[in-house]
Amino acid sequence: MSKLALITGASSGIGWAFAERLAADGYDLVIVGRRQERLEEFAVSHPKTTVRTVVADLSTPEGIGSVAEICATEPVTLLVNNAGVAHYMPLAELPADKATELVNVKVLAPTMLSRAVVPGMQERGEGTIINVAGMIAFGGLPRTPRCPAAPSTAGVWRTSSRCPRLSARNWRAPESRFRSCARAWWPPSSTSAKAWT
């Protein structure tokens, strides 16, 4: 049986690099993003890999729900919660719609996708979840006290990677792995797998 990876934010940057690396490692892929043409470009450029493209906006309940359904019903071996958005501004100046977008993309989406994928991983006895966070989740940057929303939402990913791992040890759960990694400063449009690895 082939290994199946689902990667969010796969239409550019780190998500694209994850997809390239996992395709090279023999995974079948479900790649999720907002730009259909970019997802299709990836699929066409990897003809030897089984690639399913899913256009979804993880800032909306509908987008989160559609991807969570895939996580719950497909044999996902590896979930990469990579989709992100950044609004760096003082909290008092952060518009409500941008605050909602931050929370939906960086907190609600990875939580709901992880929640949906874990039962299948437990049933199959293996699985890995990777949460891609920013460096601000691992200690912050000098300017972040003035714009706390972005680092606090990124910090959720770091913490959410630790809690299930500790719980799994206590439950003597099957081989499940939870990881958080920092992206530091990464140009959003960069697609270099070589640079990422």
Image (cartoon, grey):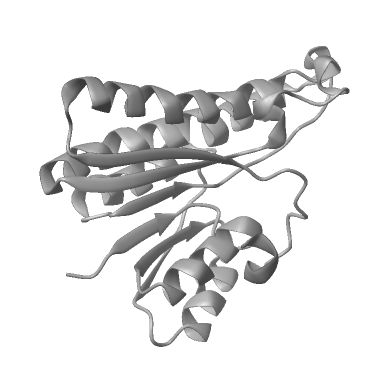
Residue 32 lies, with reference to residue 79, above or below; the image says below
How many numbered tags mark residues here? 0
Decide which of 35, 45 is in the foreground and name it. Answer: 45
Q: Can you tell which quarter of the image residue 193 is in?
A: bottom right
Q: Residue at x 21, y 56 (%)?
A: 75
Q: Is residue 39 above or below residue 91?
A: below
Along the horizontal axis of the image, is 55 left or right of 182?
left
148 versus 18 height, above or below: above
Compared across the picture, whether 162 is left or right of 28 comes to right
**On the rendered image, what quadrant is the N terminus found in?**
bottom left
For the question of whether residue 96 can be seen, the reply is no
The picture places residue 116, in percent across and down from the top left corner, at 27, 38
From the viewer's perspective, tell me whether residue 53 is left or right of residue 167.
Answer: right
Q: Position of residue 19 (x, y in %)?
A: 49, 66
Quarter of the view holding residue 113: top left
Q: Is residue 160 visible?
A: yes
Locate the C terminus by quadrant. Answer: bottom right
Query: Is 117 in front, or is 35?
Result: 117
Residue at the bottom extreme, as displayed:
47
Residue at 38 percent across and 49 percent down: it is 79
Residue at 41 percent across and 72 percent down: it is 25
**Residue in front for this viewpoint, 194 or 134:** 194
Reply above or below: 63 against 163: below
Q: Residue furthest left?
A: 123
- Left or right of 5, for residue 43: right
User: Residue sitting at 28 percent across and 54 percent down?
Assistant: 77
